Image (cartoon, grey):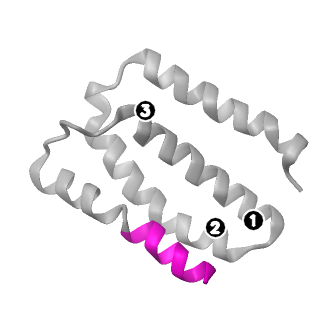
Amino acid sequence: MGWLGAAIFVARQLPQALRLVRTRESAGVSKLGALNAITNTSGWVIYGFGVGAPVLWVPCLFAIPLELVVLALIRERMSNRERLLALAWAAGLALAWPVGGR
């Protein structure tokens, strides 16, 4: 069941990345949502490695390149404030690891 969920997780990211590559039109794409996606997916890679669960980190290795494509194509629209918010979120997750991680 976990691998099925992992496949759906990756597959649901394909349409947006492909549309952005094809049209270069990024209107309607959430900048903070895209930053949040790469931050959270990276966190799952780290956590999955940490607990020895390939079902958590393997799909993320396919999702991260798709998320990077989205970020690359919307980066001009991103403000420094949004970048700082994403950095703060990533730092918060990193600091939470010792509290809630295994």
Residue 26 lies, with reference to residue 58, above or below; the image says above
Residue 98 lies, with reference to residue 79, above or below; the image says below
Q: Is residue 5 magenta?
A: yes
Q: Secondary structure at mark 1?
A: helix
Residue underneath mark 3: 32
Rendered image: mark on residue 49: 1
Image x and y of residue 62, in percent = 47, 68
Image x and y of residue 1, in percent = 61, 84
Tell me the magenta residue range: 1-11
Q: Amino acid at mark 1?
A: Phe
For the residue carrying disc 2, how many other residues have a C-alpha within 10 Å: few (<14), some (14-19), or many (20+)?
Answer: many
Image x and y of residue 48, in percent = 72, 64
Relative depth, front residue between 68 and 26: 26
Name the residue rendered at 22%, 38% in the picture. 28
| Numbered disc in front, either 3 or 2 | 3
Residue 50 lies, with reference to residue 59, above or below; the image says above
Tell me which label, 1 or 3, sits earlier in the chain: 3
Which residue reaches farthest front?
1
Which residue reaches farthest top?
81
- Image quarter for residue 87? top right
Residue underneath mark 2: 57
Tell me which label, 3 or 2, sits earlier in the chain: 3
Asked if the residue under mark 1 is in contact with the one under mark 2, i.e. CB atoms within 8 Å, the reply is yes
Asked if the residue under mark 2 is in contact with the one under mark 3, i.e. CB atoms within 8 Å, the reply is no
Q: Amino acid at mark 3?
A: Leu
Asked if the residue under mark 3 is in contact with the one under mark 1, i.e. CB atoms within 8 Å, the reply is no
- Image quarter for residue 41? bottom right
Q: Magenta segment, principal secondary structure?
A: helix
Q: Is residue 9 magenta?
A: yes
Image x and y of residue 37, in percent = 49, 47
Name the residue rendered at 47%, 24% in the picture. 83
